[in-house]
Amino acid sequence: MKHGKNNSYTKRILYFLTLMSVFLLVFVACIDNVVVQQPENGGGSESGTTDSIPSSGSETTTTPTPDYNSSYQWGNLAVGGGGYVTGIVIHPTAPDVKYIRTDVGGAYRWDASKSEWIPMLRNIGDNKGAAGLALDKNNPNRVYAALNGGIYRSNDKGVTWQLLKSVAYNSNASLRWFGEPIAVDPNNSDVIYAGTVNSGVLRSLNGGNTWSAMLGVPTKEIRSVVINPNVQANGRSKKVYVAVTGKGLYRSSNGGDTFALMAGAPEAPNCLAFQDKLYVTHSQGIAKYGDGAWTDLTPNGVKLNYGDIAIEPGNTSHMVTTQFIKKMGQKIYRSSNGGSSWETIDTGAVPVVQHREVPWWPNNWFSAATAAFAFDPQKPGNLYFTDWFGIWNAPNFWANPIDFYTKEKGHEEVVTLTVKCPPSGAKVYSGVADVFGFKHTSVTDYPEKQLYNMHEGFDIAYCESQPNNIAYLGADSNNGAGTTKLLVSADSGDTWTVRSVPGSTLGRVAISSTDANKMVYIAGGATGSVYYSTNKGASWSQASGAPTGSTTRKTSNDVWNKAFLLTADTVDGDTFFLFDQGYLYASFDGGATWAKRNTTAIPTQTKFLNVAAAPGLKNEVWVSLYGEGLYKTSDGGKNFTKVDAFTKAISFSWGKPVDGSTTPTAYCFGDKSGVQGLYLSTDLGATWTRADKGEKYLNKVRMIAADRQTFGRVYLGSSGEGIFTAGL
């Protein structure tokens, strides 16, 4: 009986446990399917009204942010050059070892297997512009670079770098096209000479480990250095030449121990080349020095400012040079008889056939402020030259006509001023320096055309519900000087209507989310006012209640201004927001009248500023304030909450929700827990995950735009390396 009682008791216990298990399973299933209605601030435990519920009336679901870090793939949005390539060097003995340098975009190595330029300087920190390059004749893997901040060496073709000497250079100086300021002795790889901006000529006798200043040379603006390898002494080449801007040509005849001004040399040398003889371009022509005498080689006796010169290896009768006058169609001359006579190319006598891989390049982008020439020593007649926008190659420069091909794959150098991603249509619009901007329909394909023939495109807006309606603000002169124009389009930039804007130049623009006719414009400058239009900018009225001078707080009034302080609410077409000195101002009547929303100011930006209205969430606005972090409001600015995750918020943007969610994805480029990077959140900031892997080149990021059509993709505008992009 005792055994039977235990059996009965055991059965009752098992029955009870079974019921509890079923109950728990049902409870968990219910919890998993709960739909979270967002409070006014869009997340967390903060209270508020229901203003931020999506306009459709549907409830918003949030998804905790997974760890996407390992899945992100980084690269460049294909634009195609667009920046000044100031130098090219080709190894004298190793095939296909080529490098280029740029004024603001670093330096690149040619990958012959991919026919593509590979950026070399992205992981050695910010602002490493390349002022000069030099190759070691005896070691094809070694390359030296004169970078902003010092002299560097790589022993693996630019994959890794070592700082050898901290010294000043300026890759974007006015004389950045004047040859290479660094040279390696062909007879002794341990001997390196480096001309500097303000430290004269430096020499190393041990491969760059230590350096000494050379005597007898002025200390300022040493731009071009070449070595005569024909005579040696003490294990190194005896003769070294340096061009000193505005001071003359200096020579050492004792292996660099001392230098002296060369008598009879051109007084204003530009570029130097040595191929059996010394060749010098200068402000009045071209000269050759050999056997103790100077010979004038100036093309057709035309005394103008000449730039680079190159002599073909193995055939000193063949040479090429150019006038330097900083304009499109700069004249290029070739000689096949050692400079006794010259032909001007791209003329009726020597026509050029241009082959362009970048479809938007204009026809006049050929020999534009041509900077550098280099013959390929392994391929007779094969010439490269670089100019304002990229790299050109003629496989047979001595043909007639001459076929020139662009070599642009991998070279991305536009300076980004703004980027915006619409909810449909084009994937992203860009505004850039010098070449205005583009409509990008593909990440990997070049844009078909430049959106407008204007210098700078510095602000972009679109209509949320009709995103084919876009607007650009552009400047018709460099840096934003000259007239500011408003361009409006109803067909995604295929055609444009040009409008005048009121008040001072520059400024910011926004378009109503529901009515493309309604626009708000903030004029630039210290006294710039706010204006509104009801007819796509055909006419403007001045608003009331808005602050003045808001675009220039903590920044300058030019195209480099990163204060994106104006936005349109994405749900209510009459609502606009602008931020000024810690206050969010709102207009609920299409921009006609404005008022402060918050009674207590939040911090103001310390450098960059982004005001971003959340897609589909009325009155949900987030504000990135650079060193003051990231703030958010869900009631149109009445109340703000600091997003504590970030101590610095450089830029902020909204992107497409993750699959299964209706909550827009938040992206912030800034410092989280002391680590700078790109972070995203799929739950309105409750959790964040990092998208990058610590790439140092991201230090150049100045603004971001998240893709509204593809979850996880984001575009990051840089200050000289194009537009970075990353996706899952």
Image (cartoon, grey):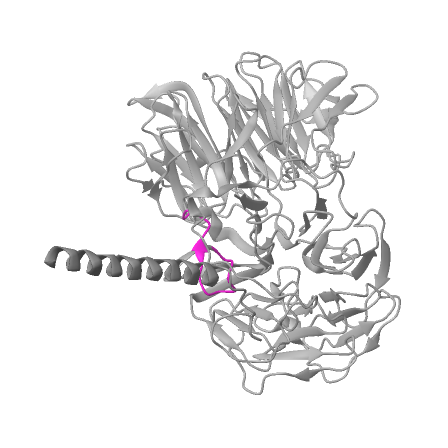
Q: Nearer the viewer, residue 702 or 290?
A: 702
| Residue range corresponding to the magenta coloring | 679-695
Q: Quadrant of the N terminus?
A: bottom left
Q: Classify residue 48 by image quadrant.
A: bottom right
Please identify the residue farthest to the left as the structure is shown.
Answer: 2
Query: In the image, residue 451 lies at what x, y percent?
Result: 77, 47
Question: At 39% across and 62% down in the image, what residue appears?
Answer: 23
Residue 16 within the magenta-colored segment of the rendering: no
* Image position of 239 with respect to 327: above or below: above
Question: At 57% across and 13% down in the image, what residue appears?
Answer: 379
* Image position of 726 with respect to 331: above or below: below
Q: Is residue 692 left or right of residue 155?
A: right
Query: In the image, residue 685 lies at what x, y percent?
Result: 49, 65
Any part of residue 309 in sight: yes
Query: In the image, residue 21 lies at what x, y percent?
Result: 34, 58
Residue 692 within the magenta-colored segment of the rendering: yes
* Image position of 491 with respect to 239: above or below: below
